[in-house]
Image (cartoon, rainbow, N blue to C red):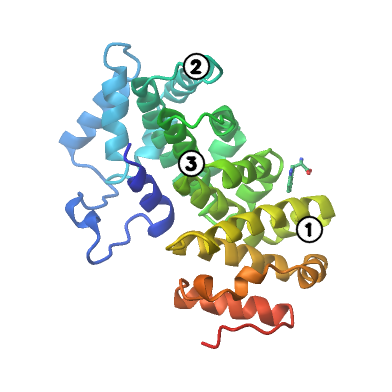
Amino acid sequence: MNKLKIFKIILMSNPGEKKPNDDRKKQLPIVTELNEEELNNLIKLINGIRDSADKENSIAELSKMKDHFPNLALYLWHANGIIAILLQDLISIYQMLSPPNTLSSSAANVVCNILSLIQCLAAHKDTRSLLLSAHIPLFLFPFLNTLNKNSNYDTIRLTSLGVIGSLVKADSSEVINYLLQTEIIPLCLRIMERGSDLCQLISTFIIQKILTDQGGLNYICQKPERFYVINTVLEKLLKKQASSSPPQKRLLKNIIRCYLKLSENTRANSALKENIPSELNDPRIVSALDENSKKCLSNLFLNLNQVNINTS
Ligand code: TRP
């Protein structure tokens, strides 16, 4: 799975939304129904998952289909035994996650294709809750928990983050409440500190979405330690961006939104007033921001009753 593609799916646009100059133009249009031939093909592919000789190819073909046909989620979920097979295949990879690092690129590819089918379930409004009730996100945590820098591991971390990204993108309190009962926050924080650029971006996006939910913000600000850990990681990311040229606009946007959300909580607001990072007033950072992020930054300083150099 192409890394840039995962990034685009999660962060850039809603499924189905078309943008000029977007390479989506080249892709098939989004459809809600299939014609008879396509439907037969879909059923053949789903049945192929049950056959070990066809499985890998069927999963790969289905994962290509999900952007064109989001209702694939319904077919996958309601087909007898398919989800169980996919989960079993994910579990069989766990043994390759610990040293000696034996995850081959073909195994990583299989995992990514399965994860992209799970992402399809996460993105669909009618399968999202079912996915949570079945605790399927937990099956991804061993992948998120890896530290290996090898690109096979990085790709499965990124694709796993993509699934969680699709869940939080729904702006649903049910999703956030679910995630708060898991260890997703510490996992994301560690990836924000040590992960590759794209992994950092998506994990910061996930934290931002958690903070955007009232329950998520309350949870994080309920204990000083939780707030401080998040604040520390955000500050480290920001300092790194201030010294890298050019800074990554999208990451900065997510960081600033995180701060803005934190500043809306009374206790976090007082804590931020004491130690808001000076980088937020650094021209190298400010000049890299888009209009929307500049507004967020102004609102942040307004919430903190502080001046900022950003006059727009
Ligand atoms: N269960 C942990 C807690 O309640 C989750 C957690 C670990 C956490 N590190 C965090 C939550 C940092 C928020 C911020 O604290």
What amino acid type is highlighted by mark number 2?
A: Met
Secondary structure at numbered mark 2: helix
What amino acid type is highlighted by mark number 3?
A: Val
Badges 1 and 2: C-beta atoms under 8 Å apart? no
Q: Is residue 134 visible?
A: no
What amino acid type is highlighted by mark number 1?
A: Cys
| Picture coordinates of residue 211, whole percent (x, y) | 66, 59
Q: Which residue is mark 2?
A: 96
Residue nearer the viewer, 212 or 256:
256
Q: Is residue 48 above or below residue 129?
A: above
Q: Nearer the viewer, mark 3 or mark 1?
A: 1
Q: Is residue 7 above or below residue 72?
A: below
Query: How much space separates mark 1 and mark 2, taking CA atoms?
Result: 37 Å
Q: Which residue is mark 1?
A: 221
Secondary structure at numbered mark 1: helix
When asked about the image quadrant of residue 66, the answer is: top left
Residue nearer the viewer, 154 or 280:
280
- Left of 41 or right of it: where is 254? right
Classify mark 2: residues with Cα within 10 Å, few (<14), some (14-19) or many (20+). some
Q: Is residue 149 above or below residue 54?
A: below
